[in-house]
Image: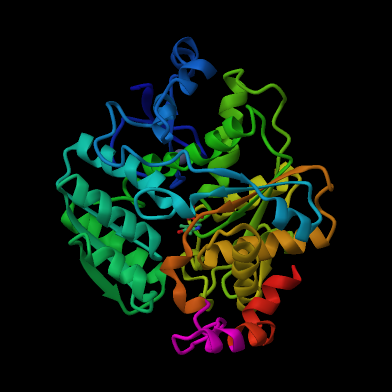
Amino acid sequence: MGFVQGLRCKECGAEYEKIPTHVCELCFGPLEVAYDWDAIKKRVTRESIQAGPLTMWRYADLLPLDGAPTVGKQVGFTPLVKAERLGRALGLRNLYIKNDAVNHPTLSFKDRVVSVALSKAREFGYTTVACASTGNLANSVAAHAAEGALECFVFIPSDLEANKVLGNLIYGATVIKVDGVYDEVNRLCAEVGDKYGWAFANINLRPFYGDGSKSYGYEIAEQLGWKTPDHVIVPCAGGSLITKIPKAWYELEKLGFLDEPVTAKVWAAQAQGCNPIVSMIKSGAEVMRPQRPNTIAKSIAIGNPADGYYAADICRKSGGGADDCSDEECISGIQLLAQTEGIWTETAGGVTVAVAKKLAEQGKFGKDETVVIAITGNGLKTPEAIQNRVVAQASIAPNLAAFDQAYEERYKLPVYAEAASI
Ligand SMILES: *Cc1c(COP(=O)(O)O)cnc(C)c1O
Ligand SMILES: [Zn+2]
């Protein structure tokens, strides 16, 4: 640990000290963490990683902290599930789910970025942390702030799902509901950050925050036996995660940990009601057009994604692409994953599964190619999405005759029938 040299502008290469800032003063490009790769190479091996904890911190040397993490010590190393039944439904023999629906502690991939950002906030000496969020980020910041005894403010759009609001309050965070879409919340937070001098996980700490996502990519490669897949399908909000997964793989390649070069095709998934990245990729446009979101997939509803250009760029350069789905298809995606694999994901996962299904139907994947679907959040947080789609199977009196009758009737019930047909 402690291999961070400073920050570097992704556009012009200007170098900065290790400070809480995210924009280049010269060209307004985004800043990235710069690491001392020669020193890392001398110290880190596959074996040293495998001997590490069964958390994302087995990759601590490749993450941007100077010391040991002080919050989120149990985050990561979630299952990579071989999805046999979903694979059969999509006509794929080597389909995997990287399942961050069970990431600890707040059941989304955001715990990866927040454990880094808030440990970093403590290294910088902050006592108040905050974020602009579409839901999951706020939950994770609230939980890790509680763990780290930090004061916490989370700013969310006022129409978020009930459980995503509760999932802040339970940790004692101050919740500011903003009457606007995420992009308006984010603009407000930039001003609040300037005035109050707090650590905003995804604003002034964004370079550090973003690198927490690399752990998702490292883990996939390790769990595939130090290989990268042929395809990965990733839900996009701000477009950060989708850029960090391949970044992680190229780092492992550079360190000599992979047996074959990285050739993975990267595919972006968004909802039709908020698809600035997908639109840009599918239309071949050079500019991204911001949108006003209108979709049930609220966790990925960012109309003006900070990393949108880089997300589109990695999809194009990798030979992958993008697709989107309707809210109806998102709900079917949630049900399909639940009823084939026993994994209940939230709306972002419904979008990702629906898009993976579309791409499979379009023949984008070879039958034997390795395909990874990024499942990034948990269905318990968005029950609204499916509440009206499922019905009680049977409601009976406590006697055998009543059960006998319900048993006779069972195939007439819609949810059971749908499950049985897969
Ligand atoms: C935030 C989020 C994403 C996407 O994150 P970005 O890195 O901003 O693109 C995907 N899925 C879920 C569930 C999220 O909460
Ligand atoms: Zn610059």
Q: Nearer the viewer, residue 253 or 23?
A: 253
Task: Please give the range of residues in magenta.
Answer: 386-405
Measured as percent of width and height from the top left, residue 65 is found at: 32, 30
* Residue 390 magenta: yes
Quick one: quadrant of the C terminus?
bottom right
Q: Nearer the viewer, residue 47 or 390?
A: 390
Measured as percent of width and height from the top left, residue 239 is found at: 53, 54
Residue 279 in view here: no
The answer to whether residue 131 is above or below residue 262 is below
* Residue 265 magenta: no
Colouring mode (rainbow / by chain / secondary structure / one colour): rainbow
Measured as percent of width and height from the top left, residue 171 is found at: 21, 59
The answer to whether residue 197 is above or below residue 402 is above
Residue at image coords 81%, 53%:
364
- The secondary structure that most of the magenta stretch takes on is loop
Residue at image coords 56%, 71%:
274
The number of numbered discs placed on residues in the rendered structure image is: 0
Residue 17, by quadrant, is top left
The answer to whether residue 21 is above or below residue 390 is above
- Report whether 60 appears left or right of 78: left
The answer to whether residue 356 is above or below residue 422 is above
Quick one: quadrant of the N terminus?
top left
Measured as percent of width and height from the top left, residue 229 is found at: 69, 38
